[in-house]
C-alpha cells in the first residue's frame, strides 16, 4: 500500500532513449491532469546511460526539465556506476565498453581513434570524459541513491538478495543481482520494484514488480503507477 493521498510513478531503464523519456513523461503529465493527489513522487530506477543514442541528452533533460511533482528520486543503476568508475579506473574501460559505454562516450563527442592501441584509446577516452563531462552531470552521478522506500514498496535498480535485511545488502547485489532474486519466492517484507532485467512486459509477482521493458531495443519505456492499493502502468 501507498500512503493515502500520495501517488508514485516509477520509471524503468531509459538507456539513452531521450525520445522515449520525453514521450513517457508527457503521459505522466497527462495522467496528473486527470486528477492530482495531495502529493506525488517520481522514482527513476537507474540506467539513464549506455546503449541508446543520447545518454548526455537524458541527463540534461532530467536536470533541466524536472516533472512538476513534489518529490523526484534518481536511483543508481549499474551502468552509471560503471561510468563513474571509468573516470578513476582505466581498467573499468573494457567491461564498460562491452555493455554500452561506447555509445555514452559518443554522446559526449568522444569517438574511437582507430590509429591508437586499445589501451591508448581508453586512456585518451578517460581523459576526454574527465575534461568534457559537465560538472553538473558529475554531481548528478555522484548523488544517485541506491534505494528508496514508499509504504509497502522498495525501489531499487536490480533487486535484493533474499532473506537479508536491507541494511546488510551488498551494493553490488542492489545494482547487479538477477537469478537469485528473480526466481525467489521469498517474502521480502515489501514488494520490490526494480529494473535491470529485461522482459517484454512488466513482470508482476507477489514479491516484486519488474519494469525494464528494454526501451533501447523495444521502443517501450514503462512506468509503474502506485496509489493506495492500486497498480497500473503507463508506457510508450
Image (tube, helix red, strand yellow):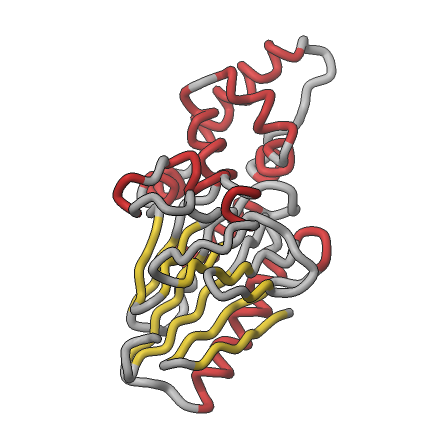
For residue 113, side relative to residue 203 (left or right): right
Residue 11 in the image: state x and y as whole percent: 49, 62
At x 37%, y 46%, the residue is 163
Work out whether residue 61 or residue 73 is closer to the camera in this orientation and state it: 73
Work out whether residue 69 or residue 195 is closer to the camera in this orientation and state it: 195
Quarter in which the C terminus is drawn: bottom right
Work out whether residue 171 or residue 61 is closer to the camera in this orientation and state it: 171
Quarter in which the N terminus is drawn: bottom left
Within the image, what quadrant is residue 62 found in? bottom left
At x 61%, y 71%, the residue is 235
Above or below 66: residue 95: above
For residue 46, side relative to residue 94 (left or right): left
At x 62%, y 28%, the residue is 97
Residue 53 in the image: state x and y as whole percent: 65, 46
For residue 218, side relative to residue 180 (left or right): right
Res. 57 in view: no
Amino acid at each position: 500500500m501507498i500512503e493515502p493521498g500520495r501517488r508514485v510513478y516509477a520509471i524503468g531503464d531509459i538507456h539513452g532513449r531521450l525520445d522515449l523519456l520525453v514521450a513517457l513523461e508527457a503521459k505522466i503529465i497527462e495522467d496528473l491532469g486527470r486528477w492530482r493527489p495531495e502529493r506525488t513522487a517520481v522514482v527513476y530506477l537507474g540506467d539513464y546511460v549506455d546503449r541508446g543514442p543520447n545518454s548526455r541528452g537524458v541527463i540534461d533533460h532530467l536536470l533541466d526539465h524536472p516533472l512538476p511533482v513534489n518529490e523526484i528520486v534518481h536511483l543508481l543503476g549499474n551502468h552509471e556506476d560503471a561510468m563513474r568508475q571509468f573516470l578513476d579506473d582505466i581498467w573499468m574501460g573494457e567491461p564498460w565498453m562491452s555493455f554500452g559505454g561506447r555509445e555514452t562516450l559518443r554522446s559526449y563527442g568522444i569517438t574511437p581513434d582507430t590509429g591508437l592501441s586499445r589501451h591508448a584509446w581508453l586512456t585518451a577516452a578517460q581523459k576526454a570524459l574527465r575534461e568534457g563531462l559537465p560538472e553538473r552531470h558529475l554531481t548528478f552521478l555522484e548523488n544517485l541513491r541506491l534505494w528508496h522506500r514508499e509504504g509497502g514498496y522498495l525501489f531499487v535498480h536490480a533487486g535484493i538478495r533474499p532473506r537479508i535485511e536491507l541494511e546488510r545488502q551488498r551494493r553490488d547485489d542492489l545494482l547487479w543481482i538477477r537469478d537469485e532474486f528473480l526466481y525467489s519466492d521469498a517474502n521480502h517484507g515489501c514488494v520490490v520494484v526494480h529494473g535491470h532485467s529485461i522482459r517484454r512486459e512488466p513482470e508482476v509477482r507477489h514479491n516484486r514488480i519488474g519494469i525494464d521493458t528494454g526501451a533501447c531495443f523495444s521502443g517501450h519505456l514503462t512506468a509503474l503507477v502506485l496509489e493506495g492499493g492500486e497498480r497500473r502502468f503507463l508506457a510508450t
